[in-house]
Image: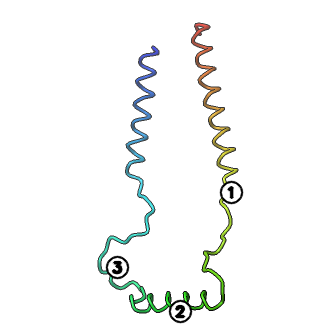
């Protein structure tokens, strides 16, 4: 198989994969059905405003400022290690391919 045909096959496979991934549904939190949106249990604006006013009054009378809860940090170590390993593996495949091509095999 010639190198031009191999490159064309690789590009076709990559393009097919990208086209297939285009149709993977995304995970968003919005609802498309208006009937379901109308029946959702959301508090009225009056209740929300009263809750905010009460929380603000409590914070000012207690002498403390209102802050968000500390939920911790996101541990990205497995993703960094996995990405580095995959990048190294890909670079190794490219180096092997170039070496094999120069040897004439």
Kindly identify which numbered label has been placed on residue 43. Answer: none
- 25 on left or right of 60: left
Q: Which residue is mark 3?
A: 37
Residue drawn at (46%, 15%) of the image: 3
Measured from the top left, where is residue 41 in percent x and y?
Answer: 42, 86
Q: Give the Cα distance between marks 1 and 3.
A: 34 Å
- Work out whether 44 lies above or below 98: below
Q: Which residue is mark 1?
A: 75
Residue drawn at (62%, 80%) of the image: 65
Q: Give the Cα distance between marks 2 and 3.
A: 28 Å
Measured from the top left, where is residue 59 in percent x and y?
Answer: 60, 87
Secondary structure, mark 1, is: loop
Tell me the crowding category of disc 1: few under 14, some 14 to 19, or many 20 or more residues within 10 angstroms, Cα based. few
- Work out whether 60 lies above or below 79: below
Asked which quadrant contains residue 11, the reply is top left
Tell me the crowding category of disc 2: few under 14, some 14 to 19, or many 20 or more residues within 10 angstroms, Cα based. few
Q: Which residue is mark 2?
A: 54
């Amino acid at each position: 198989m010639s190198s031009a045909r191999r490159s064309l096959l690789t590009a076709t496979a990559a393009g097919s994969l990208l086209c297939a991934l285009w149709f993977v549904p995304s995970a968003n939190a919005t609802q498309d059905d208006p009937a379901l949106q109308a029946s959702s249990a959301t508090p009225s604006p009056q209740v929300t405003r009263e809750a905010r006013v009460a929380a603000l009054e409590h914070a000012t009378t207690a002498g403390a400022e209102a802050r968000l809860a500390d939920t911790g940090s996101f541990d990205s170590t497995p993703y960094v290690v996995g990405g580095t390993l995959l990048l190294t593996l890909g670079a190794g495949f490219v180096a092997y391919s170039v070496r094999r091509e120069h040897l004439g095999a």
